[in-house]
Amino acid sequence: MNQELKPIKHSEAHYAQHEPSNSINEQLLLIEGAGCASCVGKIESALKKVPGVIKAEMNFADRSVSVEGSALSDQLIQAIQNAGYQAKLASNTSATVSLDEKEQEDQLYYRRLLKEMTIALALGIPLMAYGLITGEMSVNTTTERIVWLIIGLLTLGVMIFSGKHFYTGAWQSFKNHSANMDTLIALGTGTAWLYSMVVVFFPEMIPDMARHVYFEATAMIIGLINLGLALELKARGRTSEAIKRLIGLQPKTARVIREGIETDIPIEEVILNDKIRVRPGEKISVDGLVVEGHTSIDESMLTGEPMPVEKSEGDEVVAGTINKTGSILFLATRVGKDTALAQIINMVKRAQNSKPPIGRMADVISAYFVPVIMIIAILSALAWLNFGPEPAVAFAIISATTVLIIACPCALGLATPMSVMVGVGKAAEAGVLIRNGEALQTASKITAMVLDKTGTITWGAPKVTDIVVSGETDETTVLQLAASLESGSEHPLAQAIVDTAKEQQLTLFPVSAFNAIAGHGVEAEVDGKKLLFGNEKLMHTKHIQLGNFVAKAQALAEDAKTPMYFAINGELAAIIAVADPIKDDSIEAIKRLQDNGIRVVMLTGDNRATAKAVAAQVGIKEFHAEVLPEDKSQKVQALQMEGEIVGMTGDGINDAPALAVANVGFAIGTGTDVAIESADITLMRGSLHGLADAIAISKATLKNIKQNLFGAFIYNAAGVPVAAGLLYPFFGLLLSPVIAGAAMAFSSVTVVTNANRLRFFKAKEH
Amino acid sequence: MLIINIICIALIVFIIWWFWIYKPNETILENHGQAVKVANGIYQPSFIKIPAHTEITLAFIREDESPCAEMLQFPELEINETLPLNKIVKIKIPALKEGVYDFHCQMKMYKGQLRVEK
């Protein structure tokens, strides 16, 4: 295997992608029928003749060939077939195909395990029944020797047919200076069989009382552990149901219009700027922008938001969502692995594979587990041989075998990842994307939640409600000038003013000398006038006299409106008040957080009166107003200094530092990419219920992990001493290796089944 | 009995030496790439020596049907990959400082090490 591999150019670990023919890419093909090194030249040469191929290099060790260029995979496969070999893409072109293949492979493996189990138990059960009924499994006469020799050989057949994978795995691991579950099973069953064969062949060497054979234990253990593996495989399949559902959202084809002709093509062949037709009831194939038509789209599968969303020209559509009513035409803006759905799937997969810190102790134990168990087995045998009653040899063999068989490193190893797998998947179903295991664990411990007001508690889409003029300038002119000034700003309040001006069909003037003063407002020159627009602080800084307008502004703020001062040429011209409606379910969601004992704190750049009014409306007692963007992270840190574990929720670019500083950063899904990148948890819908859901799911998952870890620790900590015979001196109890085999087989299944219980977890209905 | 005791103690010493003390030979990486087979409960090769500050690619191919082999993790590098059966998964290892970096399955039953040296 020590072959050279040329470095690949992709930035991430992934399989080769099946991409359209006009782009240069790298594809990896698996070759069948290449038996000798001379095939390499033949295959490479055949590929290099295909138009568009720049480079073709074969790795003979793993029978793969890497092809760089613009040729389609079908052309490459055809060229290889013409050269006398078979080939297939090393990767799957779609996650759905990959999943189907995995299911088929798992099914084959499952059937094989069941077959192996049946064979082993077909021998083990009658033998065990015979032993239990007659109590006679010893070798004293020649006839018994012959019979047990035949049974011993049959057991060897079972070991080879049903248990071969344990022995080869154990041997390979041993050669590699490592030990695993196979090592324990191979040693346990091997010891029982070898001792029994010694009894059969050389009974005179063994004391009378110890001439007992354990073929039934060998066969039963192999059968039961294969059964355990099969059940575990099935249960594991269920842990990934959430990701399967996400992958299942991806349609297989798209109806593309190229050069005026509509054709259904595989999703992998859709390229950027393709025009795609979607009819009612069909799924959106890739991300895009609506260019024609009007419809409502069900996005619940991604966002958890049950209400369909209206879409028309200029609106974005997302792959995997369902077109409900109208027929639309859209332009593909993100395809393949760049679609939001593909990225969500990728993020969920990665998070499912990551481990929260709580699992680290189990990892450390797992690393030393198997050799320690081997040592305990030897010590146990030694103790029985030196201090045990007769037949000491039989006791020693039983205890050593039972210790080896009962110990289950897998239960420990599975405890954390299985729960994370289900928990992260469950969260994704509720529209909550958790970045990794650490975020999952920390979210379960949150004691304080900081909420940004605009866009988080409120819709973030404010409207102009009042214009109170001062002096000669009329309302329309004030609005026209203010809208012109704000036309370059991306702040939601600025957008509200521009939108209102547009609604009134006002013409906007060009702006010069524009200057945004963070947390205060803006200044610029418009139509030859020096304009200032912002909060009270800005007016004081620029020495603008506000007079009795401060009281008017306060009155507006007490109605949860945001008043802003507008000055022309150094004199106050008006107060423009804007109100941002509170989201319908913010009040209920905040109450859910508070009911869970979480201290909820609101931060806003708005003035104190508005902040107070909004806070009162949503039931928040603690709030900080007029907070500059850079101060948001300081507020988070201040809470952390008080000993709180702080969650921060925000949606804007200015929230990114605070999201990063918080113990857990939550980006609300309607937010910007920057906020989402800085966040540990992303809420795909705008509702704050997502926060309460995320915390509830993380708590349930952590509880599940703790149950699993506790169970696995207790199982091993109690099982191993009992197997070694610790109870024998007090109660005369010594565990049978068969019982140990059954316990071991079902310990892993129990862990996976317990993790699967999380699938039925429901965050509080809302 | 004395002989049995001595043999058992020798066995314990052997286990400690074989699994914990002995340092197996490393496969020295050549030309930025290395294929790693996942079969019979182990990674082959398991111990790979790579040059420091150099980006490399490891191509994993899983032939082991056991679901335990399915997940590959490089915890220090925050790499978590699913290894489909009989398919090559190329993993780009970024340029690393000198040191030892473990890779393993989710349950740490399949184990390997990258030894990064000058």
Image: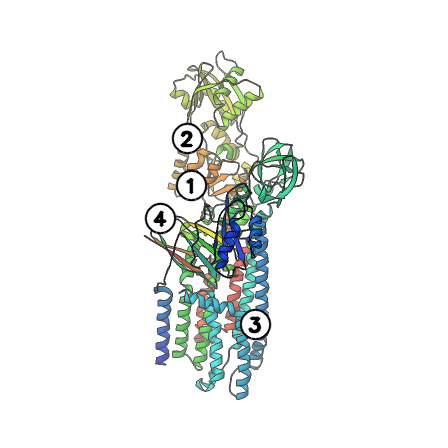
Q: Which residue is mark 2?
A: A628
- Tell me the element at label 1: loop
Label 4 crowd (10 A; few <14 / some 14-19 / many >=20) = some
- Tell me the element at label 3: helix
Q: Nearer the viewer, mark 4 or mark 3?
A: 4
Mark 3 chain? A
Using the image, determine if residue A108 lies above or below residue A199: above
Q: Which residue is mark 3?
A: A120
Q: Which residue is mark 1?
A: A662
Mark 4 chain? B
In three-dimensional space, the C-alpha distance between marks 2 and 3, rounded to whole angstroms, equals 71 Å
Q: Which residue is mark 4?
A: B53
In three-dimensional space, the C-alpha distance between marks 4 and 3, rounded to whole angstroms, equals 52 Å
Q: Nearer the viewer, mark 3 or mark 1?
A: 3
Quadrant in the picture for residue A323? top right
Q: Is residue A298 left or right of residue A715?
A: right
In the image, residue A367 lies at what x, y percent? 41, 61
- Residue A423 visible? The answer is no
Q: How many marks?
A: 4
Q: Do marks 3 and 1 share a subunit?
A: yes
Q: Is residue A157 left or right of residue A1?
A: right
Amino acid type assigned to the residue bearing label 1 in the image: Ala
State yes or no: discs 4 and 3 in contact (Cβ < 8 Å): no
Q: Do marks 4 and 3 share a subunit?
A: no
Q: Do marks 1 and 2 share a subunit?
A: yes
Using the image, determine if residue B106 lies above or below residue A625: below
Q: Residue at x 52, y 15 (%)?
A: A477
In three-dimensional space, the C-alpha distance between marks 4 and 1, rounded to whole angstroms, equals 33 Å
